Every structure is written in C-alpha cells, then in structure tokens.
Image (cartoon, rainbow, N blue to C red):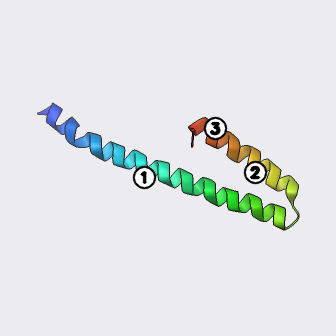
Amino acid sequence: MPARRNQKAAPRRRSQAERYRQAAQLTLEQLDWCIDYMHRIHKPGIGQVLRRNRNAIAKRYRL
C-alpha cells in the first residue's frame, strides 16, 4: 500500500514544484519592472543594486 500512496503523491509534488517555479518567475519579472522603474525615475543606484540581487537570485535558483 505505501508504494501506491507514493505514486499518487509524486504528480502532486511535481505540480506543487511547478507552481512554486512559476511564482518565482513572476516575482523576478516584477522585480525587473521595479528595476526599470528605478532607472526611469532617475534612481539608477537603487536599480543597479536591485539588478545585482535579482541576478544572484536567478543564478542561485537557476531561473
């Protein structure tokens, strides 16, 4: 019986992992918007720091 339970849980875990991946990707896209906004309002220093952080996060999690 436990093997059958694990078989049912595997697709659910993959589905949950995919939702988290999509949420992370959307969050990075929002951060991109914020970075661009900082440049548009003439706050390039803040934009550069945010971009470095964004790139480090994306690299760490390979997004």
* Type of amino acid under label 2: Leu
Q: CA distance from mark 1 to mark 3?
A: 19 Å
* Type of amino acid under label 1: Arg
Left or right, residue 46 beside residue 19: right
**What residue is pinned by disc 3?**
59
Q: CA distance from mark 2 to mark 3?
A: 14 Å
**Residue 39: percent from left, percent from top:** 83, 61
Left or right, residue 24 beside residue 13: right
* Type of amino acid under label 3: Lys
Left or right, residue 57 beside residue 52: left
Disc 3 secondary structure class: helix
What number is the disc on residue 19?
Answer: 1
Dividing the picture into quarters, in which one does residue 8 lie?
top left
**Residue 31: percent from left, percent from top:** 67, 57
Left or right, residue 1 beside residue 22: left
- Residue in view at x 28 percent, y 40 percent: 10
**Residue 61: percent from left, percent from top:** 57, 38
**What residue is pinned by disc 2?**
50
Label 1 packing within 10 angstroms: few (<14), some (14-19), many (20+) = few
Dividing the picture into quarters, in which one does residue 5 lie?
top left
- The answer to which of marks 2 and 3 sits earlier in the sequence is 2
- Residue in view at x 21 percent, y 37 percent: 7
Q: Quadrant of the C terminus?
A: top right
What number is the disc on residue 7?
Answer: none
- Residue in view at x 63 percent, y 60 percent: 30
Disc 2 secondary structure class: helix
Dividing the picture into quarters, in which one does residue 35 lie?
bottom right
